[in-house]
Image: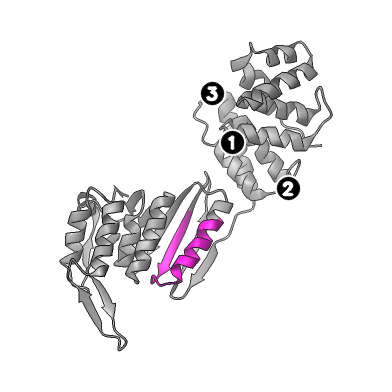
Amino acid sequence: MFKFVSLLVYLTLALGYAYAADTAGYLAYQRGDYQQAIQLWEKEAESGSYLAAHNLGVLHEQGTGTTSDMKLSAKWYLTAAKAGYAPSQFAIARLFEEGIGVPKNLQEARFWFSRVLLIESNSPESAELKRIASDRISRLPRHSEEVFEFESGRFVFVESVLSRCVIALQGRITRDTVFAFDKVVKRAAESGCTDPALLLESPGGNLNVGIELGRDVHYSGFRTVVRDYCASACALVFLGGKQRTLMGQKAKIGLHQASSTDRWGEKSCKGSSFDDASRAKRNYLRRVVPTHWEEIFKRSMSTPCTDISWIRGEDAVGLGIATHLQ
């Protein structure tokens, strides 16, 4: 049976629970009354104590005071891990990695090992736990890029550590872009990605789809990043980001009027602020950039659909288009 390193045992019952050493459950454990400790810790855990939940995980894993039960052990470790307790996050990560008490799931293992790396404590014990977690992550199989294609482009999904991931949008924005985006967002959620970034590399496309994507980005809490160019409908998606970053000197955002194309392929600009397309754009900007929407809208409407107004660097920050430069 899988056993944890001595460091983890030290952290769990010697260090971790020392903060609540005067509780009845801990006192029962100290005097060797393990069955009583389990009963008391179960009551504490059910009342929300993650320390009690963690210690139940340890006792069920070791078979102390009860028959060893790795499913129960995993249950209690996961309860404490979700509450943010690093030793439990490490413990459940190892169980997912080995497939003990839970189905083997390397994505879940990576997710919980990554949580351990966020420990703020600088104690030697915490540093060692982070070192071990980092080593375990480095040994897990790397995920290759996953591609989700649509009519005139694709999304590329790449995972990284600390539960972050990057989704790159490449190509023109068309009707079926939304469906591909839904698929890649679902994939990011399945991987445990909690801080997604959307890297935009698009000349634009359908206005209404750009607004729909921008709303999804905004309400999902995505960060948006541009390192080259992002224009027209792409700019609207960029503006939906909770944090909007222009990366490098080449990064630029392009604005212009909306347009429509007739059945013969002739393009006409929507230069009026009162047509349906302009109203939709104005309402969207009011929602996602409420303190800067008016100036952005004016800049957009002052540029014909046959041209592009490029905004870079500090100008983009001053205009409220970007929030960060890198």
Q: Residue 212: horizontal and vertical position, in percent?
A: 38, 62
Residue 230 screen position, x and y as percent? 32, 64
Q: Is residue 312 visible?
A: yes
Q: Label 1: state its secondary structure.
A: helix
Magenta-drawn stretch contains 317: no
CB under 8 Å between discs 2 and 1: no
The disc at residue 123 is: 3
Bounds of the magenta segment: 166-187
Task: Decide if residue 37 is on the left or right side of residue 80.
Answer: right
Mark 1 crowd level (few <14, some 14–19, many ≥20, 10 Å Cα): some
Q: Which residue is mark 1?
A: 82
The x and y percentages for residue 213 are 40, 61
For the residues labelled 3 and 2, the Cα–Cα distance comes to 33 Å
Please state if 306 lies on the left or on the right of 74 as rendered: left
| Of callouts 3 and 1, the N-terminal one | 1
Q: Amino acid at mark 3?
A: Ser
Find numbered disc 3 in the image and state the secondary structure of the residue it sits on.
Answer: loop
Q: Which residue is mark 2?
A: 103
Q: Position of residue 200 (x, y in %)?
A: 38, 61
Query: Can you tell which quarter of the image residue 146 is in?
Result: bottom right
- CB under 8 Å between discs 3 and 1: no
